[in-house]
Amino acid sequence: MNLPESLKYTKDHEWVRVEGDIAYVGITDFAQSELGDIVYVDIDTVDKDINQNDVFGTVEAVKTVSDLFSPLSGTVQEFNEKLENNPELVNSDPYGEGWIIKMSIADASQIDGLLTAEGYREVIGQ
């Protein structure tokens, strides 16, 4: 199971990469493997303010649709447009080309409340 130590994680299986006051958000390697082949990513929150734990979109796999929960409060600035034609990037490269949204960070103190890779391993029993 690939869990980069440099990222932060949520109990809902999202990851966060912080770059200054911007956060990149996607789903973890564990989540994509549990979902199976991802066929569609639906994000309708671009340019909207969202709160921590709000649903910011959904990811659709062959057998299920799963909500995506925001790890932080902020404004969704961008959807990874590569996912429109290649949603399988979430499966093949969840921490790189498969990122889902880019958002501004409204409250940087929320970052400290996210899980480390070690804490996330405990959540998923790894």
Image: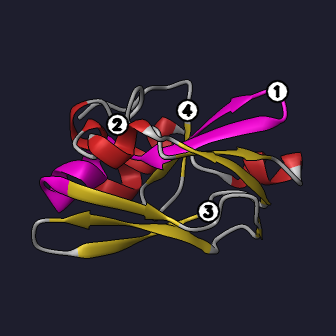
Q: Which label's residue is closer to the chain start, 2 or 1? A: 1
Q: Nearer the viewer, residue 24 or 40?
A: 40
- Residue drawn 69% across and 39% down? 23
Classify mark 3: helix, strand or loop: loop
The disc, 2 or 3, on the residue closer to the chain's N-terminal end is 3
- With respect to residue 55, does 7 lie above or below? above
Label 1: which residue?
Answer: 20
Task: Judge whether residue 125 can be spotted in this image.
Answer: no
Q: What stretch is highlighted in magenta?
A: 16-38
Q: Hey, what amino acid is under mark 2?
A: Pro
Residue 13, compared with residue 19, is above or below; it is below
Mark 2 highlights which residue?
94
Q: Residues within 10 Å of mark 2 (few under 14, many from 20)?
A: many
Q: Residue at x 34, y 36 (%)?
A: 94
Q: In this view, does 24 lie to the left or right of 63?
A: right
Going from N to C along the chain, the mark reached first, 4 or 1, is 4
The furthest residue to the front: 85
Q: Position of residue 29 (x, y in %)?
A: 29, 41
**Mark 3 sits on what residue?**
70
**Does dot 2 land on a helix, a strand or a loop?**
loop
Q: How far apart are marks 3 and 1 (CA)?
A: 18 Å
Q: Which of marks 4 and 3 is nearer the N terminus?
A: 4
Q: Which of marks 4 and 2 is nearer the N terminus?
A: 4
